[in-house]
Amino acid sequence: MPKPLTDQDKRKQISVRGLAGDRNVATKRDYYFALANTVRDHLVGRWIRTQQHYYEKDPKRVYYLSLEFYMGRTLQNTMVNLALENACDEATYQLGLDMEELQDIEEDAGLGNGGLGRLAACFLDSMASLGLAAYGYGIRYEFGIFNQKIVNGWQVEEADDWLRYGNPWEKARPEYMRPVHFYGRVEHTPEGVKWVDTQVVLALPYDTPVPGYRNNVVNTMRLWSAKAPCDFNLKDFNVGGYIQAVLDRNLAENISRVLYPNDNFFEGKELRLKQEYFVVAATLQDIVRRFKSSKFGSTEVVRVDLSTLPDKVAIQLNDTHPAMAIPELMRILLDTEHQKWEKAWDICTRTCAYTNHTVLPEALERWPTDLLQNLLPRHLEIIYEINRRHLERIAKLYPGDQDRLRRMSLVEEGDQKKINMAHLCIVGSHAVNGVARIHSDILKATLFKDFYEVDPHKFQNKTNGITPRRWLVMCNPGLAEVIAERIGEDYIRDLDQLKKLLAFVDDDSLIHDIAKVKQENKLKFSAYLEEHYKVKINPNSMFDVQVKRIHEYKRQLLNCLHIITLYNRIKKEPNKNWTPRTIMIGGKAAPGYHTAKLIIRLITAIGEIVNHDTVVGDRLKVIFLENYKVTLAEKIIPASDLSEQISTAGTEASGTGNMKFMLNGALTIGTMDGANVEMAEEAGEENLFIFGMRVDDVDAMDKSGYDAMDYYNRIPELKQAMDQIAGGFFSPDQHDLFKDIVNMLLHHDRFKVFADYEAYIKCQEKVSALYKNPKEWTKMVIHNIAGCGKFSSDRTISQYAREIWGMEPSLERIPAPDDPRQ
């Protein structure tokens, strides 16, 4: 039974009664839409009032530009943030409906690949919860990240038709439709520069409300959809070509058709560049319109002049994907507003800021100049002029240093001339940040060293965070409640208060309650696995979990080698008292990434052998979690005991999954990489299982040379595992199935899996030993939860606001729609 209702809950409930309808003809989906629309009703009043509040107060606004927003489901998050959960639970219960069943009808909004897109979603939640006038701008992809099916052990992709049944959370805003131009040519006339003979695509905005946590603030995420103009291809009145002209409208509308499914990899396709410019051009028109039409502007000089733009507008670029915002803003200032270059450039740099998300060279965007010349000729001219002035400045600072000019140029010469988009972002922004301390240090020391030497003041760190609303209160209500019983509920807004749990670290009742919640979550997830994956697992085993995109640098292969080693040890000494483990690995591989797809096949192959070995029994099970996404993360993370964060030191910029596991009572086995470093600092290094090379060790090995064969020949258990993979032990029907993986690991492994193998195995032995002592394990868990405060996205966003955007966050509530106006 749900909690007893307060009077306020009962008032809310009255408006939910409309759900009943005609019981005989209504489907489950009808009830879901009825509930979603009922909850949405509670949003719109607050939404309108918030936007009205901004219009009147005219605060500085921040625009978060991202090609990805990995939002997941909206219903339960909205109920949590609006305090509607009790009322809705009670109403659905009285109608004989199952709330969880209704929630399961909602499709994930999978408009992202992984960390970068999910970070944007957490940031939107925090910006609203901190009362910032913030807008998320992106693309309304018709098809989000593909659905992953595992067929005969292999990944197969399926289109994600998430809008098939409609989306109750979005509102189309055709009145704000904007034209976006492509192709054409540039004319330099006495009246100024003109970009002419362009092809036009219309950008149609769809708005989704973003509620703050119980502060009555509702911000907006605006996603653009591509529409062909009515006269598309018809003005060329090709006789008899009318039907074809109408069919060709698809070409224009393909821009917002599908999310590119690459994570940490650059694919230089024209359609992707069109997407990047499309979101930027539409958004900047919107920003300028809103700036010029603000109420207080009309009492001044009607703000015809954009010279005060940086006082009222901050633009944050989420990686280099929206980098075209820099030349586009310059184009508007120069060609439309007729500003002088120096003034325009000052406005541009003071407005824009850039977040870097990776140091992997294959992920850095470098667009061929011939592609830009064809698609965006005016922007290429502007980029060349930015570069000319930039290099002129560098040449003055370092006379005769030709190599430095070459390294720092926005234009990379070679077989094919390319624009380095990261260099464009650094030069065109007033702030550049990495996403964890170690990552920001690496940027200053290596990737952007030359730029740091010239402009050290630009470089900052903003360690990533996660929203405690979705990633604790919503996905793990049992744990949230246990915490609230000890320290009150304020920690949900101020996660640093979790430190207060340290006073209870030896409290037997807290230790008992935390262990009990974890066991309940494990039982619930076991039932879910049995129902959906038809696998039975031992809920008393350690749940050892690695969920993230499949990538060589994340080293799922190191995990595989541990599984095989553990399997071989159990087979060798079957009567020993082994700590039982259920090892779960999940994540999607980019469709074109051969090695990543083969890694999935290896994991499923190991599972086929291990899970059917009667000697091993339920002491070791290996499960590949199909179609890992936000909604699956919300189920698995609260049920996990051990979190695998095992990337090669210096490769994972931050990670955010690591923070979610820590907050939900899992212990971490990990390298000193990304935010793991700061997690160890906050919780105490003795409360994480840290192993392996540090960044300095990796650097040293790069200099001296990494010889995989040396480890292979020196470590018998490693050799045995590799020989089993190579010899077909895990692929009896095709002995050489994994030859590409074996060859890579032995001869060209950039990520040095073998170099950390021994340390990893030893560290896993420590994990197994501690798990046998549940009380000490749970004490370590409490230390971890108590150290989580820093990793709230509220802290991250407060730092962005104060240190980059020049805005002040606030925990004030604004009046609710039914409150009297002040």
Image (cartoon, helix red, strand yellow):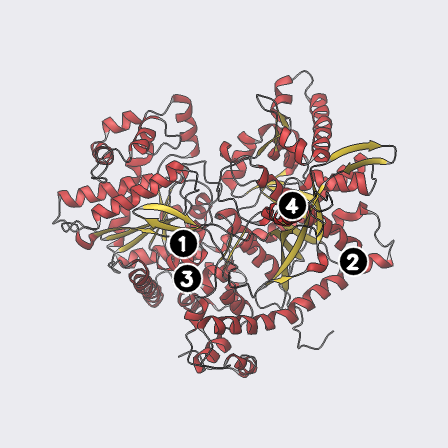
User: Residue type at mark 1?
Assistant: Phe
Q: In this rendering, does residue 464 appear at all?
A: no
Q: Residues within 10 Å of mark 4 (few under 14, many from 20)?
A: many
Q: Quadrant of the C terminus?
A: bottom right
Of mark 2 and mark 1, the one earlier in the sequence is 2
Q: Which residue is mark 3?
A: 503
Is mark 2 in CB contact (under 8 Å) with mark 1? no
Q: Which residue is mark 2?
A: 294
The residue carrying pointer 2 sits among few (fewer than 14), some (14 to 19) or many (20 or more) residues within 10 Å by Cα, namely: some
Q: Secondary structure at mark 2?
A: loop
From what the image shows, is residue 291 above or below residue 2? above
In-front residue for pair 158/129: 158
CB-based contact (under 8 Å), mark 1 and mark 4: no
Mark nearer the N terminus (3 vs 4) = 4
Residue kind at label 4, given as amino acid type = Phe
Q: Is residue 419 above or below residue 406?
A: below
| Disc 4 target residue | 278
**What type is the residue that disc 3 sits on?**
Ala
Q: Residues within 10 Å of mark 3 (few under 14, many from 20)?
A: few
Q: Give the CA distance from mark 2 to mark 3.
A: 50 Å
Q: What residue is drawn where x is 30% and y is 36%?
A: 757
As displayed, is residue 125 above or below residue 451?
below
Query: Which label lies toward us, 2 or 1?
Result: 2
